[in-house]
Image (spheres, rainbow, N blue to C red):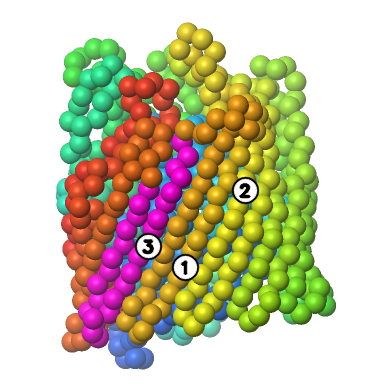
């Protein structure tokens, strides 16, 4: 226990050191390494077989029997769960072997990313639903904890360290019944690694690559001690000099630019009997240039702090009470400075967003019924300060949005092989708007329903319906810039989704086909009002329809992987016009081939059709992993991303000008070599 407290103190110190020089950070990691070696190596080598891979490595059979939690907040079978679900496991992440969760999620069926403000904000597009105000219409959770800023409703996947991930559950479709606002497209819930044996576990990754890139991961997990304590520590750090590329501004000027960045996140989890504590710190520094005008450079410094406490009390084998409270505090500073001359004068913008959320839930079973009933209360705020005008344009009066909800979700076994799913949520959200001169109150009732039928073993047919809503963000309501105006009278977006799913397991091949429709009412977007100015307005109804095919497989004993295809078509229901930023076709896949004991190769790829002004592309990555028999716990890795030097652009949705329709993401192959050490 004392060793773990020592490590915790070192990581607290690391939160400070992350802002300091690379030499100090290197010293910090060297000290952590010494502590880990002294505290872990002896007991691991002396007390067991040293093979901890089985704790997190999941076989194909284990995946099919996986119990997931996001669809009903209770454990349910992956195959039978009443939802459109994709699961990205720790083994899938190791197969893909990227440095960030965002890169890994690019290979999940129907997911892709799009630029907002020249790579400063990145939003996730699911089933073609793309936003122009940075909000993703998707809720990101980390062990059920919401991670998003009320300022713009968006998030950064780098908040969550890859070192912490046991699996990612992506539940698609409208799902406000259990999770409230922002769940129009999907809920992405990242489940952290937990210790299930009596041995300590440590895992470290160090990787270096092209363009002065280095990446490190640390995961430390302890078993429960004699007093009931269990500690988990996770850390990711990435630094890169950036790929040299040419970008353009709206005046047509070109600029050769390498977007260097550094980011790090630290997570500490402490469990004591019925209590669980979660503490998290995130820091990202990303310099760039404004695409409106290259006269200014832009330094972006983003930080976030998360704190959560969770209490569970089991009254019986069938009933559990759960109380959770968390706070998410986000800050972003943009420093604008003269790029090539001494004029004009420098200035800065400061952004902030805070979300405080509390949930009280009762989860239980009664005969053939399973239910989750609960209440939720949120207080949120978002602001932006501009030093060049010495004023706030967003959050001028520091008004808070308050939201409370009551919800019920359940399922019933009607007969052998037939389940009924039902649920509803009432939400009341309010905030005082000085621009309107009164308190704005929005009420919403979202419902959920469906049936799951199993005509034979390991085959399921699902018909699912869901509703959702999204409260307008502070940016959408209050922004006052040269080109974009907010609208305090915006109404919440509301949506409904249908899914018809057929899934089956044949031998060691899993296949799922999902026909879907998503309709959004009162869609919020930017509308031209004259003079080159746009205003956020509700524009009516948009609709997305398509089909997704997903598969996971284990062929022979040596070949395994996953693949997916997505087709999506977006349409404005009022005008009948196709939506510009909706890709039609996406194909993804990844393979692992074990050549012999300790030697394997990996292959991953993605095809995305053109969308907006961005051209279609094919991206292919390859890797080789070697685990020498005489070095137990060590794996040496070689990786080549974008081996065909594919030019990839992302649509730039944060700008209205046709002069900057896309932002380059990559043009070159990226090479990496690294080592993974596991005890």
- Report the residue at 32% width, 82% height from top: 558
Q: Quadrant of residue 13?
A: bottom left
Q: Earlier in the sequence, mark 1 or mark 2?
A: 2
Which corner quadrant of the image does residue 427 belong to?
top right
Q: CA distance from mark 1 to mark 2?
A: 21 Å
Q: In this rendering, does residue 257 appear at all?
A: yes
Where is mark 3, residue-wise? 589
Where is residue 510? Give x, y as percent.
50, 73
Mark found first going from the N terminus, 3 or 2: 2
What secondary structure is marked by label 3? strand
Q: Please state the extent of the stretch shown in magenta in the rendering.
A: 581-608
Q: Which residue is mark 1?
A: 551
**What residue lies at 74% left-to-right and 47% top-to-bottom?**
446
145 with respect to 299 (left or right): right
Q: With respect to residue 361, does 609 lie above or below?
A: above
**Quadrant of the image for the C terminus?**
bottom left
Q: Is residue 63 magenta?
A: no
Above or below 389: residue 312: below
Q: Circle 2 is placed at which residue position?
A: 517
- In the visual, does 103 lie left or right of 454? left
How many neighbours does mark 1 have within 10 angstroms: few (below 14), some (14-19), or many (20 or more)?
many
Nearest to the observer: residue 633 or residue 306: 633
Of callouts 3 and 1, which one flags the residue occurring earlier in the amino acid sequence? 1
Residue 660 % position (x, y)? 33, 26
Where residue 496 appears, as percent x and y from the top left, is 68, 45
């Amino acid at each position: 226990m004392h060793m773990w407290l020592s490590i915790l103190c070192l990581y607290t110190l690391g939160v400070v050191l992350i802002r300091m020089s690379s030499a100090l950070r290197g010293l910090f990691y060297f000290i952590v390494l010494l502590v880990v070696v002294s505290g872990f190596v002896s007991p691991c080598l002396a007390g067991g077989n040293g093979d901890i891979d089985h704790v997190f490595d999941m076989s194909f059979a284990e995946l099919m029997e996986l119990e997931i939690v996001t669809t009903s907040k209770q454990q349910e079978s992956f195959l039978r769960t009443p939802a459109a679900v994709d699961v990205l496991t720790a083994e899938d992440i190791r197969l893909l072997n990227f440095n960030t969760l965002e890169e890994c999620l690019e290979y999940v069926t129907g997911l892709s990313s799009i630029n907002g403000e020249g790579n400063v904000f990145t939003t996730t597009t699911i089933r073609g639903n793309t936003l122009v105000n940075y909000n993703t219409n998707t809720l990101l959770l980390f062990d059920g904890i919401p991670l998003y800023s009320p300022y713009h409703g968006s998030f950064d996947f780098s908040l969550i360290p890859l070192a912490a991930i046991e699996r990612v559950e992506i539940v698609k479709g409208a799902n406000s019944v259990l999770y409230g606002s922002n769940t129009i497209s999907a809920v992405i819930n990242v489940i952290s690694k937990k210790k299930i044996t009596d041995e300590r576990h440590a895992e470290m990754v160090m990787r270096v690559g092209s363009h002065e890139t280095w990446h490190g991961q640390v995961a430390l997990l302890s078993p429960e001690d004699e007093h009931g304590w269990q500690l988990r520590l996770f850390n990711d750090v990435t630094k890169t000099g950036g790929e040299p590329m040419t970008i353009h501004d709206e005046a047509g000027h070109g600029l050769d630019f390498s977007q260097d960045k550094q980011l790090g996140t630290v997570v500490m989890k402490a469990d004591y009997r019925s209590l669980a504590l979660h503490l998290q710190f995130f820091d990202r520094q990303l310099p760039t240039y404004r695409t409106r005008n290259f006269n200014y450079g832009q330094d972006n410094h983003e930080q976030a702090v998360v704190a959560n406490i969770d209490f569970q009390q089991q009254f019986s084998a069938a009933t559990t009470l759960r109380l959770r409270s968390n706070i998410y505090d986000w800050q972003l500073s943009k420093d604008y400075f003269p790029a090539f001359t001494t004029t004009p004068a420098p200035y800065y913008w400061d952004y902030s967003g805070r979300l405080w959320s509390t949930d009280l839930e009762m989860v239980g079973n009664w005969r053939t019924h399973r239910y989750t009933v609960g209440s939720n209360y949120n207080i949120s705020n978002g602001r932006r300060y501009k030093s060049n005008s010495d004023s706030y344009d967003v959050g001028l009066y520091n008004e808070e949005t308050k939201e409370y909800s009551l919800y019920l979700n359940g399922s019933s076994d009607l007969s052998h092989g037939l389940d009924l799913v039902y649920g509803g949520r009432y939400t009341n959200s309010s905030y005082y708007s000085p621009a309107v001169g009164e308190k704005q109150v929005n009420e919403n009732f979202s419902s959920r329903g469906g049936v799951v039928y199993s005509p034979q073993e390991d085959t399921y047919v699902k018909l699912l319906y869901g509703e959702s809503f999204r409260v307008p963000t502070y940016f959408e309501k209050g922004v006052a810039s040269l080109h974009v105006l907010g609208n305090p009278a915006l109404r919440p977006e509301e949506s409904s989704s249908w899914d018809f799913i057929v899934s089956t397991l044949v031998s060691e091949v899993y296949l799922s086909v999902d026909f879907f429709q998503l309709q959004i009412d009162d869609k919020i977007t930017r509308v031209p009002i004259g003079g080159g100015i746009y205003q956020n307005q509700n524009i009516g109804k948009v609709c997305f329809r398509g089909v997704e095919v997903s598969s996971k497989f284990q062929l022979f004993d040596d070949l395994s992987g996953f693949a997916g295809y997505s087709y999506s078509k977006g349409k404005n229901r009022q005008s009948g016009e196709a939506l510009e930023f909706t890709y039609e076709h996406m194909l993804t896949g990844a393979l692992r081939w074990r050549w012999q004991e300790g030697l394997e190769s990996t292959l991953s790829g993605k095809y995305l059709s053109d969308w907006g002004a961005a051209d279609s592309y094919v991206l292919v990555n390859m890797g080789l992993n070697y685990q020498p028999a005489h070095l137990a716990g060590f794996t040496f890795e070689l990786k080549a991303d974008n081996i065909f030097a594919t030019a990839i652009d992302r649509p730039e949705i944060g700008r209205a000008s046709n002069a900057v329709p896309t932002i380059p993401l990559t043009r070159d192959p990226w090479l990496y070599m690294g080592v993974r050490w596991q005890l």
